[in-house]
Image (cartoon, rainbow, N blue to C red):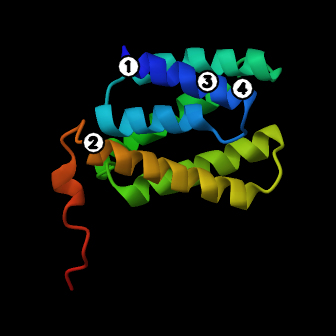
Amino acid sequence: MIILIILALFLVLQVALTTIPLVFIFHLLSAVILRKLWVLGTAFFSGIFLDIMLHNPVGGTSIFFLISLMIVFVYDRKFDIQTYPFVFAVTFLGDFLNSLLFGYQNLFVHSLFSGLIAVFFLFILIKLNRFDLSHKFSSLSYEG
């Protein structure tokens, strides 16, 4: 239930206040942390809602969300996706492509800021210890 409240809050914030893809970040973190396929359904319907509210062609954002999340789920089988670099890279590339497709300005800065926000949200979720990921992030030092 709290997940739906957070999604609704991010939808309202993205529609009313910012061009930062908070909904994309929400779905990406949900896919990375929870690894559940219901994320695809919520991504589809929230994409439709965003398109309607932002007067974009209906379905474009949904298709973008679904393709991005399917790529994340495919990489889940080959790589460890529950890491800061992966979350940053996918958010950066996803926001860059989204900004390019929908015509936003300052692509690089916008994408960099989105990647940092996603990593910050992941850090907060780990510190709140809501998910059992602390063993993956406790040893981030280089062992040469």
**Which one is closest to the eye, mark 3 or mark 2?**
2
Given the image, on which type of amino acid does mark 4 rest?
Val
Quarter of the image where the C terminus is located: bottom left
Q: Is residue 65 visible?
A: yes
Alpha carbons under labels 4 and 2: distance apart: 27 Å
Element carrying mark 4 = helix
Mark 1 crowd level (few <14, some 14–19, many ≥20, 10 Å Cα): few
Asked if labels 1 and 4 touch by Cβ distance under 8 angstroms, the answer is no
Task: Provide the residue designation for mark 2.
Answer: 128
Mark 4 crowd level (few <14, some 14–19, many ≥20, 10 Å Cα): many
Q: Is residue 43 visible?
A: no
Element carrying mark 1 = helix
Task: Provide the residue designation for mark 1.
Answer: 2
Question: Residue at 32% of width from left, 25% of height from top?
Answer: 36
Mark number displayed over residue 39:
none
Task: Provide the residue designation for mark 4.
Answer: 15
Alpha carbons under labels 3 and 4: distance apart: 6 Å
Given the image, on which type of amino acid does mark 2 rest?
Leu
Tell me which numbered mark, 1 or 2, is placed earlier along the sequence: 1
Task: Provide the residue designation for mark 3.
Answer: 11
Question: Residue at 53% of width from left, 56% of height from top?
Answer: 116
Give whichever of 70, 65 is nearer the camera: 65
Asked if labels 2 and 1 touch by Cβ distance under 8 angstroms, the answer is no
